[in-house]
Image: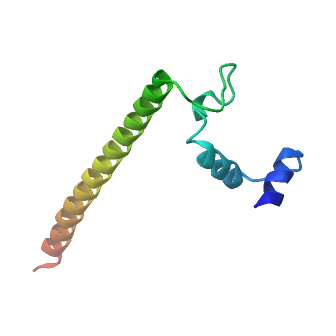
Amino acid sequence: KQNAISNLELGKGGSLKLLFQVLNFYSNYVFIDLIFSEKFYLISNTEEDEAQKANYNSVIIEIIRQSEKNYEDAMSNAKKELETNLQKAINLLQP
């Protein structure tokens, strides 16, 4: 909301959630990794800048894919371990 942005501009505080929302909104126009650097600029209008942004996007997508695979692998391993431990418990309970 406008009052939240005004408070940020005036240095009257805000939250990390609001900061991330603002950065997310402007990520189409701002290279977030450069926002606190000397090379900061608002609008990307060269092919090189767009190529760099596309490279960042592809790296982020790959990180997400790897995280999903790691999660799936961990869940599969946990399920196997649970089944093994349940079978051991069942075997101990049988006379």
Camera-nearest residue between 69 and 81: 69
Q: Is residue 64 above or below residue 58?
A: below
Q: Position of residue 70 (x, y in %)?
A: 30, 47
Please name the colour scheme applied to the rendered image.
rainbow
Q: Is residue 63 left or right of residue 13?
A: left
Q: Is residue 3 above or below residue 40?
A: below
Residue at position x 39%, y 34% from top? 59
Quadrant in which the N terminus is drawn: bottom right
Quadrant in which the C terminus is drawn: bottom left
Q: Position of residue 71 (x, y in %)?
A: 32, 52
Image quadrant where residue 55 sits: top left
Residue at position x 12%, y 72% from top? 91
Q: Residue furthest top?
A: 38
Q: Position of residue 40 (x, y in %)?
A: 66, 25
Residue at position x 42%, y 37% from top? 57
Q: Position of residue 68 (x, y in %)?
A: 32, 50
Residue at position x 38%, y 40% from top? 63
Q: Residue furthest bottom?
A: 95
Q: Is residue 25 left or right of residue 52?
A: right
Figure label count: 0
Q: Is residue 95 above or below residue 43?
A: below
Camera-nearest residue between 24 and 86: 24
Image quadrant where residue 56 sits: top left
Q: Is residue 88 left or right of residue 18?
A: left
